Amino acid sequence: MSRQLLINGELFDGDRRQPRCAVVIEDGAIASISAAAEAPADADETIDLDGLLLAPGLIDLQVNGGGGVLFNDAPSAESLQQIIAAHRAFGTTACLPTLISDDAAVMRRGIDAVSDAICQGVAGIIGIHLEGPHLNPERCGVHDAAHMRPLDDAAFELLCSLDEGHTLVTLAPETVEANQIRRLHAAGLLVFAGHSAASYEATRQAIDSGLKGFTHLYNAMRPLVSREPGIIGAALEDPDTYVGIIADGYHVHRATLAIAIRAKPKGKTILVTDAMPSVGSANEQFALNGELINVENGRCVTADGALAGSNIGMIDAVRYVSDNGIVDIDEALRMASSYPAAALGIDDSLGFVRPGYGANLIALDGDLNVVHSWIAGDGMEHG
């Protein structure tokens, strides 16, 4: 791979900003970082960023679809390439394609598709998010309750069957045994809770058993009330678990989002999209479980007005929390890059711009539009 020089950008490396930087990319990784005046002269390619903000590429843990493709409907390496291509224009350089509750055959095809994509080098696919089917039908949202089923031995083996990349599993703690969460955690899976009516006590037991986070906090969850904190109260109280939040202005009120960020220790709140096929597509209609979903005023909704995933990319979520004064731009970028990398245990290779790290980068203009992106050093211009 050629030696690339990115020069004259303002670097946000995940910790702090550096003006007028020079970043050298070699063999898909960050080779060096210096002031622009000290840039090496032997680059094969030089890109003048002309004041753009260079930042870590964004990492999305919950991507149902994009570019007109729903992962459940088209579980293949080719469809994953189309999905990540759509999201790359919104700053996503690594993601977990998300399979919502479905039958075992579709789950097997989805897992095989992710494994194939990783083996084929489909840039940006780093694992899978299995959102269900071990959820509470009382909190199914737009998931098909008919697909929800117990976590038996065959289901356990299926959840653990991805042989390449990372697996995130979302389950309802009240529908499984604590020892099953322990087994999943011991097998190396990242276990989150979601679509749940769990009590505070059941959630605490799950955390003690290896539960590490919560999927789209607040949504499809038993609400927090004064004498029954439930799953949300446990999530906000616990200092060690992560919470994913859909920051689109529809799923969660600005104030409710701010409360979660302030309640959790710094580094534990993650932006996710829960994106649907309409993201990066001119088509504002798609089918989900046989039901037509429309994009109306930026929302994906069923015929009766229920939310059905989101119509945002990751940079939209970053822009929402920063434009609404919830956090500053740098913290918003961390919530979309270094914090999800930490949740996956890959913050030693992604989520920061540091020598030796993978060259997953984005360059942003003053309105947080994505102008350039790089995945493992492979650059693309967006406009």
Image (cartoon, grey):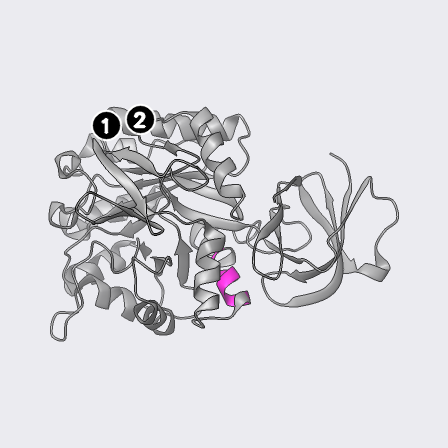
Residues marked 2 and 1 touching at CB (< 8 Å):
yes
User: Eyeballing the image, is 133 above or below 342?
Assistant: above
Residue 364 picture location, percent across and down? 61, 55
The quarter in which the N terminus is drawn is top right
Residue beneath the point at 18% across and 53% down: 196
Residue flagged by tag 2: what amino acid is it?
Arg
Label 2 element class: helix
Q: Magenta part of the protein: which range? A: 330-336
- Whether residue 125 appears in this view of the structure is no
- Whether residue 173 appears in this view of the structure is yes
The quarter in which the C terminus is drawn is top right
Q: Is residue 261 found inside the magenta-colored segment of the image? A: no
Q: Which of 368 and 96 is in front in this view?
A: 368
Q: Which residue lies furthest to the right in this view?
A: 41
Q: In this view, does 172 lie to the left or right of 34?
A: left
Q: Main secondary structure of the magenta part?
A: helix
Q: Nearer the viewer, residue 78 or 187?
A: 78
Disc marking residue 108: 2
Q: In this view, does 178 lie to the left or right of 44?
A: left
Q: Is residue 331 found inside the magenta-colored segment of the image? A: yes
